[in-house]
Image (tube, rainbow, N blue to C red):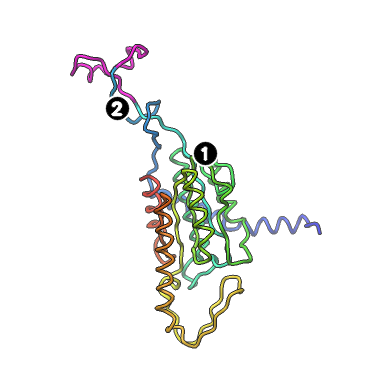
């Protein structure tokens, strides 16, 4: 069945309705960071000082640092650190459960994850990096931020409860950031980390949860169901499940933290009741560190 032009246009307009607000929010959030160029710790044409070295036959008189040379019997060249654009890949889960928001005053987990991913992407782009969503071609520049934003707001939510980053899209030299609630089967994420480590790829996992998922405030009779509705649990004493739930959440976080550490990655958490700048600053610090 062919889609009529008016249906296609209506779908495109609905998908892009949140684009201006997402772009504006991400720009404001990214402005909190002061991105810089990234060095390679080798001599090159960058601006940052790296080391002094003795002058050789191929060095010109202009390359000699005469002030440093005056303090010794030899001539020295002031090497600068080579600076090149790095590549970053961002992935945001589209699993059904990411659309959960525990209160009208809070954003859905997916909306917060989209905001963090785009703001981080903007900051990295401003620092001269090439950035893309997982599986897409990393590119530099302002237009790439708009491409990322359009892809985030237009992608449909998955009908199921599971989503996993595409391991086949990993490339050596990348840095990767994954945004998810990580409440589903952890094995795909563990396999992804192992594959990334084998390629020498580092990055960060950011677990995004609603405050209700952090504290389990429910009491009395409650029907719990997964985002897709495929999993259900009916209880008359929700409070009686709290300790077991919190213990399992702690176990899951410990598992992901150990796996990230073993792979040279970082694991962080964020709940949607907190300012997004906290999570963004953490991501920036671990990527820059």
Secondary-structure class at tag 1: loop
Taking 112 as reference, is 122 above or below it?
above
Residue 163: name its quadrant.
bottom right
Quick check: is 62 in the magenta stretch? yes
Taking 237 as reference, is 17 above or below it?
above
Where residue 122 sits: x, y (%)?
47, 46
* Viewer-closest of 163 and 216: 163
Taking 155 as reference, is 84 above or below it?
above
Which residue in the structure is indicated by mark 1?
Answer: 140
Which residue in the structure is indicated by mark 2?
Answer: 51
Residue at the spot 43% in from the left edge and 40% down from the top edge: 127
Taking 19 as reference, is 63 above or below it?
above
Residue 102 shown left or right of residue 281 in the figure = right
* Viewer-closest of 89 and 257: 257
Residue at the spot 74% in from the left edge and 59% down from the top edge: 7
Residue 168 shown left or right of residue 242 in the figure = right
* Viewer-closest of 52 and 192: 192
Span highlighted in magenta in the image: 55-79
Disc 1/disc 2 C-alpha distance (Å): 29 Å
């Amino acid at each position: 069945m062919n889609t009529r032009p008016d249906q296609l246009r209506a779908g495109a307009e609905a998908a892009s309705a949140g684009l201006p607000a997402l772009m504006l929010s991400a720009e404001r959030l990214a402005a909190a960071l002061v991105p810089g160029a990234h060095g390679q710790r080798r001599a090159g044409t960058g601006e940052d000082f790296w080391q002094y070295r003795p002058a050789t036959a191929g060095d010109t008189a202009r390359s000699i640092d005469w002030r440093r040379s005056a303090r010794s019997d030899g001539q020295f060249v002031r090497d600068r650190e080579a600076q090149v654009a790095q590549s970053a890949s961002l992935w945001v889960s589209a699993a059904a459960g990411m659309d959960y928001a525990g209160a009208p005053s809070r954003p859905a987990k997916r909306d917060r994850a989209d905001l963090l991913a785009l703001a981080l992407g903007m900051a990295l782009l401003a620092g001269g990096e090439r950035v893309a969503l997982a599986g897409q071609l990393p590119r530099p520049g302002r237009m790439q931020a708009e491409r990322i934003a359009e892809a985030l707001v237009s992608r449909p939510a998955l009908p199921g409860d599971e989503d996993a980053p595409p391991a086949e899209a990993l490339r050596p030299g990348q840095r990767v950031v994954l945004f998810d609630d990580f409440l589903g089967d952890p094995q795909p994420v563990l396999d992804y980390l192992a594959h990334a480590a084998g390629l020498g790829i580092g990055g960060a996992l950011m677990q995004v949860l609603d405050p209700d998922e952090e504290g389990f405030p429910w009491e009395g009779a409650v029907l719990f169901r997964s985002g897709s509705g495929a999993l259900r649990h009916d209880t008359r004493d929700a409070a009686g499940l709290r300790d077991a739930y919190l213990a399992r959440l702690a176990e899951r976080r410990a598992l992901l933290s150990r796996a990230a550490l073993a792979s040279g990655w970082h694991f962080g958490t964020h709940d949607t009741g907190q300012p997004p700048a906290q999570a963004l600053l953490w991501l920036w610090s671990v990527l820059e560190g």
